[in-house]
């Protein structure tokens, strides 16, 4: 984002000036700058003249193809979500915004309610505003938004929500994330690894548990039934009671989310067990506010939702630009964020 | 929201049919319905005919004044915020959306970055889209958004961010919330009440501490210096060490936010002190995920941010409708949400 320094003058003359730089220098949106330079839209004569003067001063050179694309674009993208309070849509949106603002595009988020008719009202409002495309996002990957986006005439991308058939969707590779967590515990010498997770009605509960079982099987270790429950600290507490009142006590617990892991860590401490000395604990989500405040701070799987949002945003831009994009669901990798709840590698 | 039941037929004939009901029945936005009935805007001839047919069937009767207002309105409102991950703008937005969707208005949220030039780009994008008005919201009430909204030609309301001079703003009555918390502890017989809070660079730290001191003074109780720190569990832990290693130990702690309170509760339990038996604890924010998962569940001050959002949304609609609204900052009341961390009233 170099190119405009001190007083709006360009200092880097090696690459072409972008429309966005003209817009920034003029203090207007990219769409307005586009209209001014293409002699379209309504605006004050002075504004149009001023934008043209700035474009000329900066050395902006529109080419024919770019201009024809510009004419069709409003430089706004709609983001629909039903994740009113949740924490999943927000990192996704941050990633989308970050990718798109670099292209001079503004993201407008609109909450769709669970009532499909109200949802439709918001979709129509976005279409009225001539957004260039829509990204649908949600609070879980196995539920669709209550709106039909299949025939709305503009590009649509699904990010962290169930995609419509034949569409383009981005989700996190949950099984891969779970595999990384369990392999991390194995590499630290843990051999009796339990899995405490959320409700079985969630698809991610099954994909994470499947990966957990598979890694153990590959390591030739005995199978333990995952313990499904709720996504809460209270369930983490209760699960520790169940696991440690018996005889075959685990030396590590892979948890389905960070709140369960927080409950597990607190319950272990209150039983006089040391984390990570006696028991290693891994969470899922890497929700900073929980993971970093745990004692000890929690090692956790991060779904990379901001990166997922960036990919979704850039892919939508490609579609808006008329480039071909293959339909299908792309699983993006998770990453393990190592803190202090699992211990150091042997000899480390 | 009665009036349309089963198959889109009205069953309640006593009040006039609204434009929103016509839009819902037709599956279009209110703006589109408005354009169809006013013979404006571009749309398929069939769509216009269908909307008119539905309006006629439902018995929609536009009046002259409403029509003249409708022509000028796009039924979208912009929400600007710099609270990317925070939890303050989300309840505010939920309240705004709830108030406005009942009026057929869609809310578009746009994140403004900390870079004023990028912020301006987003504001211009919203103005390009002809939103009817803008609500500015943030992550704290003592900082302004990095955009100038003072002369943009459409109504602006500030909600949970520092308002521009001479504008209309809504904030929560923090001092009132703090007063309710301390009075609650006094009513339960607590007499040695400490205050553990956040950084002194926040205006709310001073308003809450001021109210705390004032309530104690009114009760004729000795003054204790508030303990400022960070908004974290770790600070709650450290503060308990400081308060309980000395001699004049408190029997209650009013905390500046729920995370501090969570750290305080955990640290008290680990010292063998009972909450609320030995020490009563109150938090601030009523952040469900922290307050409800504390052991015991935390009594906390709720800033009523959704109600604040509703008020801001309805006030913006009044401005859009051309009604006069007095400038100034309105402080809306907080409420104390009583859970189990303070104990029962004496004899209760």
Image (tube, coloured by chain):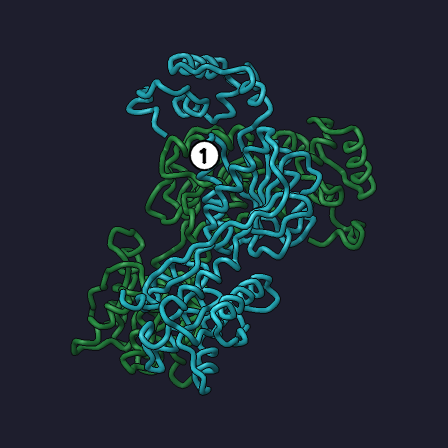
Chain colours: A cyan, B green
The x, y position of residue A54, in whole percent, is 40, 15
A231 versus B114 height, above or below: below
Q: Is residue A2 left or right of residue A204?
A: left
- Residue toward you, B265 or A292: A292
SS class of the residue under badge 1?
helix
Label 1: few (<14), some or many (≥20) within 10 Å?
A: some
What is the total number of numbered labels drawn onto the structure image?
1
Q: Is residue A120 left or right of residue B143?
A: right
Please name the residue shown 43% across and 41% down the image. Answer: B168
Q: Chain of mark 1?
A: A
The x, y position of residue A204, in whole percent, is 56, 61
Which image quadrant: the C terminus of chain B?
bottom left
The x, y position of residue A42, in whole percent, is 56, 19
A248 versus B177 height, above or below: below
- Residue toward you, A171 or B193: A171
Residue B184 in sight from this viewpoint: yes
Q: Which residue is mark 1?
A: A101
């Amino acid at each position: 984002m170099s190119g405009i320094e001190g007083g709006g003058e360009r200092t880097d003359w090696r690459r072409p000036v972008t429309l966005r730089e003209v817009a920034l220098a003029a203090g207007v949106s990219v769409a307005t700058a586009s209209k001014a330079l293409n002699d379209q839209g309504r605006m004050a004569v002075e504004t149009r003249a001023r934008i043209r003067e700035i474009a000329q001063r900066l050395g902006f050179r529109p080419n024919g193809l770019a201009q024809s694309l510009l004419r069709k674009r409003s430089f706004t993208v709609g983001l629909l979500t039903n994740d009113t309070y949740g924490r999943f849509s927000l990192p996704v949106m941050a990633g989308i915004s970050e990718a798109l603002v670099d292209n001079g595009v503004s993201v407008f988020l609109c909450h769709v309610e669970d009532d499909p008719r109200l949802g439709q009202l918001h979709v129509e409002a976005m279409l009225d505003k001539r957004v260039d495309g829509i990204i649908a996002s949600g609070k879980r990957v196995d539920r669709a938004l209550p709106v039909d986006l299949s025939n709305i005439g503009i590009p649509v991308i699904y990010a962290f929500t169930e995609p419509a058939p034949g569409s383009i969707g981005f989700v996190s590779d949950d099984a891969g994330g779970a595999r990384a967590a369990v392999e991390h515990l194995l590499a630290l010498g843990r051999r009796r690894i339990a899995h405490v997770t959320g409700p079985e009605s969630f698809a991610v509960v099954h994909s994470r548990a499947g990966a957990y079982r598979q890694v153990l099987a590959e390591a030739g270790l005995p199978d333990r039934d995952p313990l499904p429950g709720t996504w809460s600290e209270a369930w983490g507490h209760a699960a520790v009671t169940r696991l440690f009142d018996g005889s075959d006590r685990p030396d590590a617990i892979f948890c389905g989310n960070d709140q369960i892991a927080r409950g597990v860590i607190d319950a272990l401490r209150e039983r006089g067990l040391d984390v990570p000395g006696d028991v290693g604990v891994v969470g899922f989500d890497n929700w900073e506010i929980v993971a970093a405040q745990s004692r000890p701070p929690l090692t956790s799987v991060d779904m990379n939702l901001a990166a997922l949002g960036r990919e979704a945003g850039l892919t939508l831009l490609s579609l808006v630009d008329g480039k071909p994009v293959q339909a299908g669901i792309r699983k993006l990798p998770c990453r393990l964020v190592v803190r202090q709840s699992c211990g150091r590698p042997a000899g480390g």
